[in-house]
Amino acid sequence: MSEERRLAVLRAIVQDYVRTSEPVGSKSLVERHHFGVSAATVRNDMAILEEEGLIAAPHTSAGRVPTDAGYRLFVDRLSAVKPMTPAERVAIQRFLAGAVDLDDVVDRTVRLLASLTHQVAIVQYPSLSRSAVRHIELVALGRDRLLVVLIATTGRVEQRIVDTSDTGQHLDDPTGQELVARIRAAVLADAAGLAFPEASGRLQALPERFEPAERDLVRAVLRTLDDALAEQREERVVLAGTSNLARFGADFPTSIAPVLEALEEHVVLLKLFGQLATHAAAGELRGIPVAVTIGHENPHAGLAGTSVVSAAYGSGSELVAGLGVLGPTRMDYPTTMATVRAVARYVSDLLEP
């Protein structure tokens, strides 16, 4: 019973400190919360929590504030994440549903997260290397130019224009048009629904199924597709709400400068998303792992005073990228986690084929 009460005291300290930004004393705890014990017992519980490194005194005569370990225990012991209201869910759904393409989805998502949480929002672009082929289209643009369009299951669209002047085919006559149609059908038959690396391998033997005079055009199309399939997108992330850090300047040990420097190194942010599988502290929602990294758990020294709440998103059972928010460790974790979960779910729904 005493351990459960100490956890309740820790929970109250976290909640009060997040709300007021002021160190929490035993007197205010007793006044605000009903623990059913004396003030002396609460002080004793706080002393034990301090010995265990879960709370600390920022000043000699001050109250107590949670440590990184205290926040971690608080997050790990959350029995429920604060649910979003129906109005909030409808607003998220409507805002994201207006997106016209993947770039618009990413832009809307990062702005929405920053607006809802008042933190720095981070969205990673879906990686083509973890995508599958949804559709491939070939469109003749006159006699010697061919538009190749690759559409991924993540919604990403890659377009390339091929100069076909050295293939011996005229794309604006009936024979050329018929050949383009046959190439399109053959490419789709071999590649549709396959992961990009597998699709690329399957298409290597395609030229041999065409007449010798037609093979140069087939090879030109395949080279273009290979270029698109080989592009790596892991290094691309989008940020919004960086100015929100200024609202929490007092929450950082020295200044927000180290945080800003870390945010400029996108590889640092990508490492955070890479930890989703191993730091699924918040459980799962519809197969989408959610993670919370707190303080010194973050892989960059500049982020030691921050927490990151992140989630993976994707279509179907395939998780293709991450999104999340970054802010001070004095964060409303239940609400932030609920928001990140909801947005990740709606983005995943948008990417469904």
Image: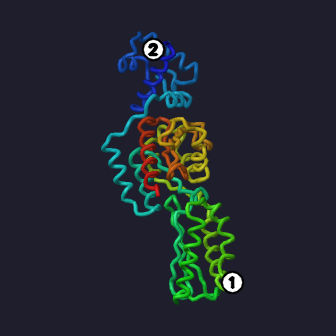
With respect to residue 279, does 221 lie above or below? below
Mark 2 residue element: helix
Q: Is residue 209 depicted above or below 7 in this figure?
A: below
> Which residue, given by chain and number where applicable, does mark 2 sit on?
42
In three-dimensional space, the C-alpha distance between marks 1 and 2, rounded to whole angstroms, equals: 86 Å
Is residue 306 visible in the rendered image? The answer is no
Place of residue 180 in the rendered image (x, y in percent of width and height, measured from the top left): 55, 80
Q: Residue at x 58, y 76 (%)?
A: 183
Which amino acid is tagged 2?
Val
Residue 88 image offset from top left, x and y in percent: 33, 44
Q: Is residue 215 left or right of residue 286?
A: right
User: Who's the residue at 35% across and 45% down the image?
Assistant: 89
Residue at numbered disc 1:
212
Amino acid bearing label 1: Pro
* Residue 132 located left or right of residue 215: left
Q: Quadrant of residue 211?
A: bottom right
Q: Is residue 121 visible?
A: yes
Residue 190 lies, with reference to residue 211, above or below; the image says above
- Does the CB distance between marks 1 and 2 fall below 8 Å? no
Above-or-below relation of 311 to 35: below
In the foreground, 40 or 236: 236
The extreme left residue here reads: 87
Q: Which mark is residue 282?
A: none
Near mark 1 (Cα within 10 A), the count class, few <14, some 14-19 or many ≥20, is: few
Q: Nearer the viewer, mark 1 or mark 2?
A: 1
Q: Where in the figure is residue 255, as x and y percent of width and height? A: 53, 43
Q: Secondary structure at mark 1?
A: helix
- Image coordinates of residue 295 in percent, x first then y, are 56, 37
